[in-house]
Amino acid sequence: MDLRINSFAEYQDKYAQSVHDPEGFWDQIAQTFTWQKPYSKVLQWEFDTPKVKWFEGGKMNISENCLDRHLEERGDKVAIIWEPNEPGDEVIKWTYKELHQRVCQFANALKSQGIKKGDRVVIYMPMIPDLAVALLGCARIGAVHSVVFAGFSASAMADRINDAQAVAVITSDGLNRGAKQIDLKQIVDDALQHCSSVHTVIVKNCLGWKPAMVTGRDVSWEEAVRDQSTDCAPEPMDAEDLFFILYTSGSTGKPKGVVHTCGGYMIYAAYSFQNVFQPEENDVYWCTADIGWITGHSYIVYGPLLSGATSLMFEGVPTYPDAGRFWKVCDKHKVNQFYTAPTAIRALMACGNEHVQGHDLSSLKVLGTVGEPINEEAWNWYHHFIGKEKCPIVDTWFQTETGGIMISGLGAHSPMHATHAGLPLPGIQLVLLDKEGKEIKENEVEGYLCIKFPWPSMIRTTYGDHERCKQVYFSHYKGHYFTGDGAKRDANGLYRIIGRVDDVINVSGHRFGTAEIEDAINTNELVVESAVVGYPHEIKGQSIYAYVICNEAPSNEAEARESIIAVVSEQIGRIAKPEKIQFVSGLPKTRSGKIMRRILRKIAEGEADKLGDTSTLLDPSVVKEVVEGAL
């Protein structure tokens, strides 16, 4: 199944078709998948409610489309390569045939534990290939999976279990993460002290720890799958049946359970994967994200497997045992498409180019970035040192709520401009709105980034609270999905994301995106990474507070501040210069690498006593240091 666009001219034609006749466009694509029963209607929608249905009446199963339909032509092709945390440990390679058998066995094991279609199952596992089996096993029987990143606290996990009213948890004894080992089973046990809905815990043996097992509730993965058949018929699922719930942080602090459904998500995950990364039949594709996030769902598991690709999974971290690990793995497995976060790129850039040298990266065809806007210095380093100035960089923009990539280049077929995500994918009708909600149609403008027509993988609701979905995403601008982001559109129509609207700083009537100022600060030779926020100013309305990580602690902070102000003044103007610059050794980040500007904003505003729970951050101790050094 090849859904790829093969030239920029073809992209322009397909995009025009997708706007002129969206139902015909998606119908043509949907028919390339396996349907147990054909759909009767492509789309029914009203944004204001919101109520959206794609491929109504159709019956399908996403695991059947990921596995069964490839068996005849690709049964012996490698589906998943697993690179372990320790470089010398055994690499695992499973073919489509082997993965199919394992998924069927696990699906049967779930059924033997009383888990059925519609039940919610929380998955809290390491980045091991069995994690993909767990997702696909749930999908095969119609159970709704909700993956929680293996590193969230027991409290955070309990919140998600209770919100979903999950009946089962799939976990492991522990996990490896670089030089650390984490006791996952104990975290699950602690969480379940506050959860009454769970009747089954399945525990995969990863580290050989033999954790305590609760009689009547806990069962080992190995015992559960033992003697199970390798044949399991895929459950017929309506295209609009609930497929998975993925929790994302809410502005109120209560996680939002973003709901995706079966048919539309399947089609968009495959379509976006094939067009953004342009994989060929024998390519090896590697996304370094964790499956606990939407990037991992769509671009480690579902997009690649729906497309019959070979997807590499990595258990470790980019700097273990040294900062050359990513490049060693690319060389070892002859990776063709490499997809990672700007945070990782900046961290590896700071470690020195010697970690890149000696690794053959000639197999790379496409480089990608995800998670946040990439600054120009990191983009140039990535392009020069990793891509050898031969690989296009696809700077992707999307959200948990969108299900798949919305804005990106398409391999080498699209114009490329550092720090610009690029053009919308076919089917994605992007608009920029002004503060009154009026569409801005010309180029070389900025505004609020919205989408004015449904796409197949869009959020359907927030689990158990449809009104919240309506208020957060569909109430700001009538007839539009509001992304919450501000963006610029250049003379060529390319989009550049300038940050969350609540991260836009208004200084004396001038609006600055946090990413814009951070990009300028990060070009200073002293700086590794920065984060800026606005704080109240009596005269200007808001002023700018910058938190800056340097290559090494400045010997003269006053001089360092002046040099940072100079680059901001030069690149943006003195109106954008930070009023306060605090030097820090780290920034509060989520485990996906997202900077928590909400916390930084509270500190800048002198409200460090109102930070809320920081235990789920990648390194909570960073917050204490930032608070103590606040200016």
Image (spheres, rainbow, N blue to C red):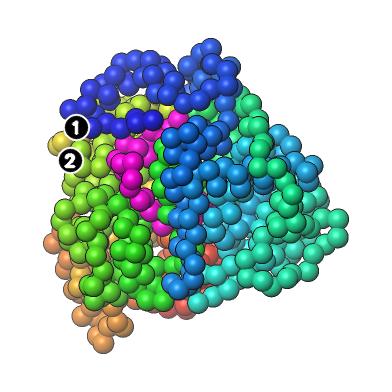
> Compared with residue 239, is residue 509 higher up or lower down, i.e. above or below?
below
Which residue reaches farthest bottom? 555
Describe the element under mark 1 as helix, strand or loop: helix
The image position of residue 524, as x and y in percent, is: 20, 69
Q: Which mark is residue 8?
A: 1
Q: Residue furthest top?
A: 40
Tell whether 94 sits left or right of 101: left
Mark before the other along the chain sequence, 1 or 2: 1
Q: Residue at the location (48% across, 33% down)?
A: 72
Residue occupying the far right of the picture: 216
Q: Secondary structure at mark 2?
A: loop
* Nearer to us in this view, 623 or 627: 623
Report the residue at 57% width, 18% height from top: 37
Q: Badge 2: few (under 14), some or many (20 or more) residues near its Cα, within 10 Å?
A: some
Q: Toward the viewer: 598 or 577?
A: 598
Q: Which residue is found at the position 27% from the left and 31% from the top? A: 5
Q: Nearer the viewer, mark 1 or mark 2?
A: 1
Q: Position of residue 495 (x, y in %)?
A: 25, 40
57, above or below 188, in the image: above
Identify the residue at horizontal 49%, vertical 28% (top origin).
264
Q: CA distance from mark 1 to mark 2?
A: 8 Å
Amino acid at pointer 1: Phe
Question: In this rendering, would 155 be left or right of 16?
Answer: right
Residue 206 x/y as whole percent: 62, 66
Q: Where is residue 40 shown, x and y percent of the image?
A: 53, 12
Quarter the N terminus occupies: top left
Magenta-span inclusion, residue 290: yes
Residue denoted by label 2: 415
Discs 1, 2 touching: Cβ within 8 Å: yes
Residue type beneath disc 2: Pro
Range of residues picked out in magenta: 266-294
